[in-house]
Image: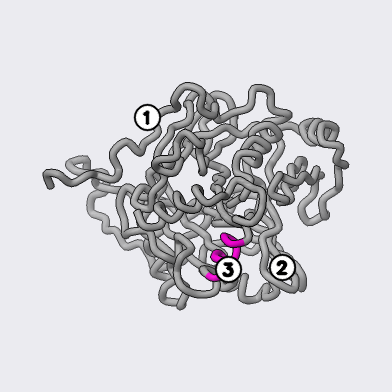
Amino acid sequence: MIGQHDPHTGLHSEQGALRGEHPGRARNPIVKVRGLAWLEFQKPDLDGAEVFAQAFGFTTSLRTQDELQLRGTDAGSPCVLIRRGPRSRFMGPAFMAAEPTDVVRLADATGRTIATLPETLGGVTVDLMDPSGLRVRVVSGTHELPALAAQQALTFNIGHDATRVNATQRPPREPANVQRLGHVVLQTTKYLATLSWYLEHLGLIVSDFLYYRGQRERGPVMSFIRCDCGGTPTDHHTLAMVLGPANRYVHSAYQVADLDALAAGGEYLLERGYQRSWGIGRHIQGSQLFDYWRDPDGFLVEHFSDGDLFDCTLEPGWAPMSASGLAQWGPPATRDFLGIKPGREAFRELRAVIGALRQDNEFDLNRLRGLLKVATS
């Protein structure tokens, strides 16, 4: 309608940096990792975790009394490792080194020692700690699980281009088979220091920056970060990082075959009583089709498909952060997804805000005002 502002205008990556803004990459990183290997969690109820995981679309690759390893259909490492513990918590990510010597180079540069991983995983790791206090593993030489039979994407008749004749579309209502781990999103009270650490230590590069509207001169508050594999295109983001009042896991994302797999898999989860957090829609930064769910322990996990792929030549985009700017289409971002739904999580976040404002970090009163505007935009 005339006079109305389209909130999506100017939010795509064609909007670049201004003079003197963050370059989004380190000049001489120690190493350049080639991707996420897995994520590690601790949970008290492995039975409940496995039931949800299989409904979500994972395959169990290892189950013992105290450990659960979950995989996708792609060849490679397990996507998720869950060990039994007294409470649910995120333990940290593991990145895959591009070369075996990169583990040695990181260990030498940081004064850390190289450790042998359990035989169920194989290989070695150097365990680092980012400025937020999160353990970050860089691994090499791990066992590679063989590929499994994958869920096939459907064949579409698009416009007048008819490629499917005398055949119907009947996607079954079944789990959306996870193909692979795509990315993890982390919140930190030390955003700029933590961002620089990942760029300098792991050679990651920024695809898109977000800033609070009216506070661009103070710098970005969120970044979508990809691996630098030279001319080989990689996911728009393997890691995303956002400034906030607490150092915590936000969500992780797992690729599925296509929109039908994502939607039918969502119906399967709903029928079994699981909670959709937000979806279905298509993101702006990264362009992924998305659908977000809460697992029984409250962790946010995402099915995605059809994400952007960038090579090393693309410079970071810059855009204001807003709730309406999180999706090109789909339902509005929910209170649950934004972390403001009344309940235990919102109360925990409120306590974190009060604590962060009393400490020396990047989350100050002006940043809080910017965050509140995002939640209501």
Q: State the CA–CA distance, disc 2 to disc 1.
A: 46 Å
220 w.r.t. 326: above or below: above
Q: Pointer 1: what residue?
A: 14
The image shows a total of numbered marks equal to: 3
Q: Which mark is residue 321?
A: none
Q: Position of residue 217 (x, y in %)?
A: 47, 33
56 w.r.t. 154: above or below: below
Q: Amino acid at mark 1?
A: Glu
Q: Give the magenta part as a residue range.
A: 347-354
Q: Secondary structure at mark 2?
A: strand
Q: Report the predominant secondary structure element of the magenta stretch.
A: helix
Left or right, residue 278 beside residue 71: left
Q: Amino acid at mark 3?
A: Arg
For the question of whether residue 71 can be seen, the reply is: no
Crowd around label 1: few <14 · some 14–19 · many ≥20 (10 Å): some
Mark 3 vs mark 1, foreground winner is 3
User: Which residue is nearer to you in this view: 257 or 33?
Assistant: 33
Q: Secondary structure at mark 3?
A: helix
Crowd around label 3: few <14 · some 14–19 · many ≥20 (10 Å): few
Q: Is residue 286 magenta-colored?
A: no
Q: Residue at x 21, y 40 (%)?
A: 161
Q: Position of residue 300 (x, y in %)?
A: 53, 62
- Quadrant in the rendering for residue 49: bottom right
Q: Pointer 2: what residue?
A: 63
Q: Pointer 3: what residue?
A: 348
Q: Residue at x 65, y 39 (%)?
A: 193
Q: Amino acid at mark 2?
A: Arg
Q: Residue at x 60, y 43 (%)?
A: 191
Mark 3 vs mark 2, foreground winner is 3
